[in-house]
Amino acid sequence: MTENETTRQAISLLQDLGLQEYEARCFMALNKLPTGTAKEIHEISEVPRTRVYDAIRVLESQGLVEVQHASPQVYRAVSVAEATQTLRQKYDTRIDTLQSHLENTDTQEAEDDEQVQEVWSLSGHEAIESRTLDLIDEANSEVALLVVDENILSEALFDGLRAAADRDLSIVLGGQTNEIMATLGGEVATTHVFETGLDWLTGRESDNEVAISRILLIDRETLLIGSYYPTAAEGKGKEQAVFARGLENGIVVLLRRLVTAGLPPIEDPGV
């Protein structure tokens, strides 16, 4: 990655963290200088000189820039460690405040209808991995995971499975290939690792067919199914998923019977 690309990405991330573009550009300029005047910051950052002063005032108020009141005034960025700590604390505080507001928001109670069959969708690898980890963490008795796309294997996933095993849950892992099974067996102490034998899960490489990436069954009543296009250039980023709960939910019943074909015998409450 070139210096210009690094700078552009850093500016973008600073904007994600709440800075305006000119503020982010000025801060990055000062990170390249031991100290700098408004003129020097303008020359490096390409921020209009009249706007540099406004940007610096904001950065100073946020504890990211220090000012030496000389003539002309001289500015310097705080250390990288101090800057990142300041931004982290700022957003930790905002997230804590948001959590408090959300928890204290009055919500309408859903109708108590056990027959409602709800299916929810998720989009994006990060969101799906987060929900996968949450479901594993919520499991009470059994975690059954079928892995088709090796790209979903991550240290976070292994940590979640290990934690479930430490809670004495039954962990059953399936892999579409020998390599996936070997990885699962080597990373997680499980009661059972098996090959899915469901070749259709991957689709056909010659076609633009959707393929299954993962199937997660929690306590045999909560189901998550991920899918992707194997031939897509950004297959991992394009992962989609559906998520459903309930012993009588039609999609859960169907997939439970499919998945449990490789699991230890259990009475299917949907029969």
Image: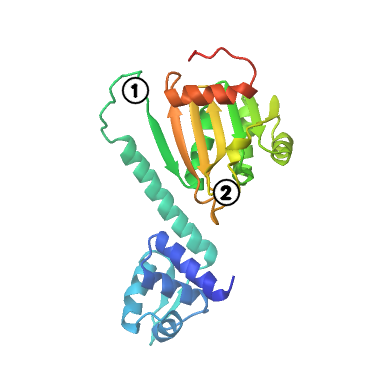
- In this view, the residue farthest toward the front is 206
- What residue type is disc 1 on? Val
Q: Which residue is at the front of the view, 229 or 152? A: 229
Q: Which residue is labeled 1 in the image?
A: 116
Q: From mark 2 to mark 1, how far is it between C-alphas?
A: 34 Å
Colour theme: rainbow
**Is residue 179 rendered to the left or right of residue 257?**
right
Sequence order check: which comes first, mark 2 or mark 1?
Answer: 1
Q: Secondary structure at mark 1?
A: loop
83 up-or-down from 209: above or below: below
Residue 189 found in image quarter = top right
Observer-nearest of 39 and 234: 234
Q: Would residue 168 be visible to someone looking at this image? A: no
Residue 125, compared with residue 181, is above or below; it is below
Looking at this view, is 179 or 157 the one in front?
179
Image-based side of 132 in relation to 184, left or right:
left
Q: Between residue 166 and residue 213, name the one nearer to us.
A: 213
Residue plotted at (45% across, 59% down):
86
Apparent side of residue 202 relative to residue 90 in the rendered image (left or right): right
Counting every numbered tag in the picture gives 2
For the point 53% across and 75% down, the residue is 4
Q: On the image, numbered disc 2 is attached to which residue?
A: 230
User: Are dots 2 and 1 in contact, CB under 8 Å?
Assistant: no
Q: Position of residue 105 (x, y in %)?
A: 28, 36
**Quadrant of res 97:** top left
Label 2 crowding class (10 Å Cα cut-off): few <14, some 14-19, many 20+? many
What secondary structure is found at the residue carrying circle 2? loop
